[in-house]
Image (cartoon, grey):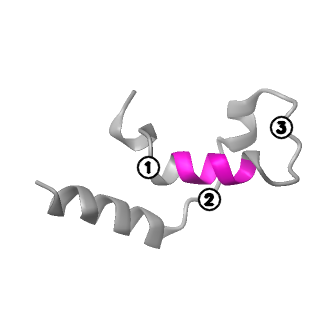
Amino acid sequence: MSIIHSKGSPWERVVNFLENSDTDTNSEWYGEFANAIIPMELMRHYFRSLKDSR
């Protein structure tokens, strides 16, 4: 698993949010989320926190 899809990553947070919303997730799950929009601010905060933790 890459850092981009790791636990707590923006991608994982958006997927969890969408899975728990009213969207239809009965089809192939990746297809449902392949085009999900991840907010820039969420990515910025996540990668800054990784940088600051070094």
Q: Residue at x 73, y 51 (%)?
A: 18
Residue holding disc 3: 25
Q: Residue 23 vs residue 11: left or right? A: right
Where residue 8 appears, as percent x and y from the top left, is 44, 49
| N-term-proximal mark, 3 vs 2 | 3
Sequence-wise first label, 2 or 1: 1
> Quick one: label 3, few (<14), some, or many (20+) residues within 10 Å?
some
Q: Residue at x 24, y 55 (%)?
A: 50
Q: Quadrant of the C terminus?
A: bottom left
The image quarter in which residue 31 lies: top right
Please tell me whether mark 1 sits on a helix, a strand or a loop: loop
Q: Where is 44 relative to 12, above or below?
A: below
Residue designated by label 1: 9
Name the residue type under label 2: Ile
- Whether label 3 touches label 1, CB < 8 Å: no
Q: Which residues are magenta?
A: 12-18
Q: Earlier in the sequence, mark 3 or mark 1?
A: 1
Q: Which residue is mark 2?
A: 37
Residue 51 is marked as none
Q: Nearer the viewer, residue 34 or 46?
A: 46
Residue 35 at x, y = what percent?
66, 48
Spatial CA span between label 3 and label 2: 16 Å
Position in image of residue 49 (x %, y %):
26, 62
**Disc 3 from disc 1: Cα separation:** 20 Å
CA gap between label 2 and label 1 equals 13 Å
User: Residue pushed farthest left?
Assistant: 54
> Which of the image's four quarters has the N terminus?
top left
